[in-house]
Amino acid sequence: MIIYGKQVCLYALEKHPETVSTVYVAKKGILPQKLFHQFHDKIKFLEEKWAQSMSKGGNHQGLLLEISELEQPALSAVKRENFLVIFDGLTDVGNMGAIVRSAYALGADAVIATGVRQLNAEAIVRSSSGALLDMPFLIIPNILDVCNELHQVGFKLYGAAMEGEAVQSMEFERKRALILGSEGKGLSKKAQGKIDHLVSIEMKHAFDSLNVSAAAAILIHRMGYAVK
């Protein structure tokens, strides 16, 4: 797959060089000397028009990579972890990438996307600033399957909702999963029937709600540390 943009491409080159098959350069001096020498046999120089075509008009900043497809872990392996983040019908790749970035930085073990059958992985890699390359990520269309599987191995499921208990005052089970609903509809009815506790963020000023990615970062941070 093709990813582009200076920050995410440099991250992939430095952290996951084994996944890179081709380095496309459309801007002189974009690569640090060390990386230029390391990948010299994989570098191809592009004219701007071809870089624009490969990035489909996106802001490539003069650097694009062809990398291997992401491998999806098995749910059986993910169930052995302790802290999961679950997307319940989220489809905005910008929000998903931001949440993956927070989840990776703040110590979640894996992310599961439900309510969808496929996603634009390249876009999520970009919007996560490369964190998706390090975060176990899997797609399971039916959230009921995920919830049932997790309950069977002792997970407590916490759903983000404005009417939930303030996360600032809670402690969480060791095996825990945070379920985040979609921007427009919130938690699905299927998920609501399986969630053990609803959690919310107590705010200082009256306001409708936070963007799902901003709320997710706060909830993940709290759930990462306030463990029984």
Image (tube, rainbow, N blue to C red):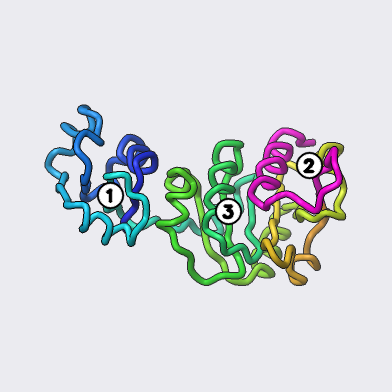
Q: Earlier in the sequence, mark 1 or mark 2?
A: 1
Q: Earlier in the sequence, mark 2 or mark 3?
A: 3
Residue 115 falls left or right of residue 121: right
Which is more toward the observer, 216 or 45? 45
Where's residue 51, x and y in %? 24, 54
Q: Earlier in the sequence, mark 3 or mark 1?
A: 1
SS class of the residue under badge 3? helix
Please identify the quadrant where the C terminus is shown.
Answer: top right
Where's residue 84, x and y in %? 63, 49
Q: In this picture, is 51 found above or below 90?
A: above
SS class of the residue under badge 2? loop
Three-letter code for the amino acid on which mark 1 is drawn: Leu
Where's residue 2, x and y in %? 31, 56
Q: Residue at x 32, y 35 (%)?
A: 14
Three-letter code for the amino acid on which mark 2 is drawn: Phe
Which is more toward the observer, 169 or 33? 33
The magenta region covers: 199-228
Q: Residue at x 39, y 56 (%)?
A: 70
Please identify the quadrant where the N terminus is shown.
Answer: bottom left
Q: Image quadrant of residue 40?
A: top left
Q: Residue furthest front?
A: 49
Q: Nearer the viewer, mark 1 or mark 2?
A: 1
Specify whether residue 227 is painted magenta.
yes
Q: Nearer the viewer, mark 2 or mark 3?
A: 3
Marks 1 and 2 close (CB-CB < 8 Å): no
The residue indicated by pointer 1 is 65
Q: Image quadrant of residue 71?
A: bottom left
The residue indicated by pointer 3 is 95
Which is more toward the observer, 166 or 49? 49
The residue indicated by pointer 2 is 172
